[in-house]
Image: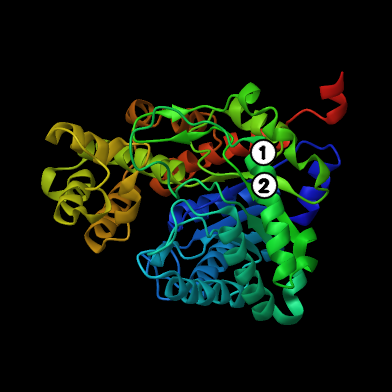
Amino acid sequence: MRDLVRRHKSGAHIGITSVCSAHPMVLRAALEHARETRGIVLVEATSNQVDQTGGYTGMRPQDFRELVLGLAEEAGLPHDDLILGGDHLGPNRWRAMPADEAMRHADELVEAYVAAGFTKIHLDCSFACSGDPQPLTDELVATRSARLVQVAERSAGSQADRLTYVIGTEVPVPGGAHHALEGVPPTSPRAARETLQAHRDAFDAAGVAHVWPRVAALVVQPGVEFDHQQVFAYQPAAARELSLVLGDEPAMVFEAHSTDYQTRDALQSLVTDHWAILKVGPQLTFALREALFGLAAIEDELFAEEQRSHLTDVVEQRMLADPSQWEGYYTGTETEKRVLRRYSYSDRMRYYWPDPEIDAAQERLLANLSGVVIPLPLLSQHLPAQYERVRDGQIEASPEVLVLDHVKDVLRTYAAACSTGPTSEEISR
């Protein structure tokens, strides 16, 4: 991470994609893509997915690490080409508790991530706990972040120099906005500078000022976001002054959250403007759903009803049976809510893929289509980009390969944006 930041700060407008997903097929696609492009892959687990008690995936940090390393071996990716990060590490999961209690849980969370070998640590203490002042001050957020740095450094021991940190106070909500938005103003340059100073002061007061050169990124809002049905594109002119804030920080870039669904040009502009770490999550499982639903439509054409997986119906039934992950997000008529459950950008469906009934339906779908030759005209209808690659001999028409390739299309857009930005000399000319 520090080498990437150093190269970016020296004028090479390069960046890295942060893959924020716990779905095994998404992870497999990311690891294969890294091997195919001979690149470095950054995989991050979010605190609501993976924590010391299991998160919503049932995985602790060590479990997630073992999953990713196992998939990397299957993909033929050397472990040295993999960076593991912890995303939104802080009291978020326990913010209904009083701050002292919530922060004790956050201490344990950070300790578990560091002990499991995660080296990129995003400190997110921007969520208010029970009894906290509203809104939180920069000083309080920074003080809590410094406390977590103490925990991380102590947990890492002699390996502490391997850790890099991400800080910030204006941190977008994990997974995109929870409601319809009217606009997303960028963080003001003044607010960004105040955040930096508050963290410098808090780190110094906590006795961890020596880690400042390992603070690799600052999270601010560049003006990008998505909600259920719209995407707010990056507007370079609106963030021009903000993009200059880190000019005096030799070892720090910006980290952009919620960059899902941005165009390649927008992503490339973000990298050029020093948002060198681009996080993507829901768009990857959105693409996974597109591919699986496309295969389910092909299955409907090739198999008798009693032989089909009925994947789309099973997903709908399970989401209705347990509405806890979408009911507070999707509103409107029954038809509108059904469309959002299936197709919204926020992709609340991603929480349901581990469900045993959905997983069984997915496996049956893949098994059914593995046993037949998928007619090319059907592939053209439902997965046209993969159809072209099958025709060109680039990929096989097996169902798993088709799904992985569709997810890789998202990663290809990010990789292109992170590697083709103009140099500082080109910008000056």
Q: Secondary structure at mark 1?
A: helix
Picture coordinates of residue 269 (x, y %)?
Answer: 66, 28
Q: Say which of 58 and 203 sits in front.
A: 203
Q: Residue furthest front?
A: 133
Q: Secondary structure at mark 2?
A: helix
User: Could you give the CA–CA distance between mark 2 and mark 1, rounded to whole angstroms?
Assistant: 6 Å
Q: Say which of 146 and 48 sits in front.
A: 146
Picture coordinates of residue 92 (x, y %)?
Answer: 44, 61
Taking the image as shown, residue 115 lies to the left or right of residue 127, namely right
Say above or below: 233 vs 365.
above
The residue drawn where x is 32% and y is 60% is: 354
Q: Quadrant of residue 52?
A: bottom left
User: Tag on residue 109?
Assistant: none
Say which residue label 2 marks.
194
Say which residue label 1 marks.
190
The residue drawn where x is 42% and y is 43% is: 176
Picture coordinates of residue 246 (x, y %)?
Answer: 75, 42
Residue 133: tell me if it is visible: yes
Disc 2 residue crowd, few under 14, some 14–19, many 20+, Cα 10 Å: some
Q: Quadrant of the C terminus?
A: top right
Say above or below: 291 vs 98.
above
Taking the image as shown, residue 12 lies to the left or right of residue 284, namely right
Picture coordinates of residue 353 (x, y %)?
Answer: 32, 55
Taking the image as shown, residue 21 lies to the left or right of residue 329, namely right
Say above or below: 56 vs 257.
below
Say above or below: 164 vs 101.
above
- Confirm or deny contact between disc 2 and disc 1 (CB under 8 A): yes
Q: Quadrant of residue 43?
A: bottom right
Q: Amino acid at mark 1?
A: Arg
Q: Amino acid at mark 2?
A: Glu
